[in-house]
Image: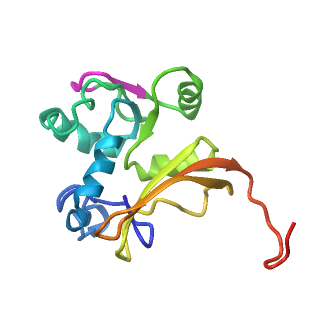
Amino acid sequence: MISLDGVMQGPGGPEEDTSGGFQYGGWVAPYDDEVYDQVVQQELQPAEYLLGRKTFQIWENYWPHHESFWPGINTGTKYVLSNTRDRSEWKNTVFLNDLAAIGKLKDSPGPDLQVWGSSELVHLLLRHDLVDEIRLKIHPLILGRGKKLFNRDALPSSFHLTGHVVTPTGVIVASYRRAGEVRTGIAGEKD
């Protein structure tokens, strides 16, 4: 979930992530509609999750008590990149402490590995070419400040569109698959 200017911070509620004085928590709520709900329900299918420590700490206090909305969240394995934590009461949680462990996990067989939130982790994954697919829900608003999905450290790379839908409230839901390196040329000239 991102704004037009790439902010991903605090989409779910006013108190979700107020770090840095962020004042717009819950900015996704006005864009809920039937199509949006269908997209979200598809994304909530059982998977494994890779999370940064900050997102995990928000989740571990919320999702164990709201399993009726996301049935697979408690049974799916949550891998957490952290140098400061190594255990949690939330079942099916595994802590990782380096990028090599993420690379091994990514290359292992098993269900999809999804990253939700976790802006600093996303930046790290993009910098080290560890992202195969990006699913964006681009909301028609500009927030001006907040944690951004992309930063200048991302490895230049290209993606191709694999699917999209536009909701009645104007949210563009788009899926992109990694397509290699960035190609350049001169506008208007054919290859």
At x 87% / y 66%, what residue is drawn? Answer: 191
Residue 63 location, x and y as percent?
19, 37
Magenta span includes 91: yes
Vertical order, 157 against 103 (above or below): below
In the image, is 42 to the left or to the right of 89? right
Residue 9 location, x and y as percent?
33, 60
Magenta range is 88-95
Residue 174 visible somewhere in the drawing: no
Residue 135 visible somewhere in the drawing: yes
Location of residue 140 (image quadrant): bottom left
Residue 114 location, x and y as percent?
43, 38
Q: Nearer the viewer, residue 182 or 61?
A: 182
At x 59% / y 30%, what residue is drawn? Answer: 103
In the image, is 108 to the left or to the right of 12? right
Vertical order, 146 against 44 (above or below): below
In the image, is 161 to the left or to the right of 60? right
Vertical order, 34 against 51 (above or below): below
The N terminus lies in quadrant = bottom left
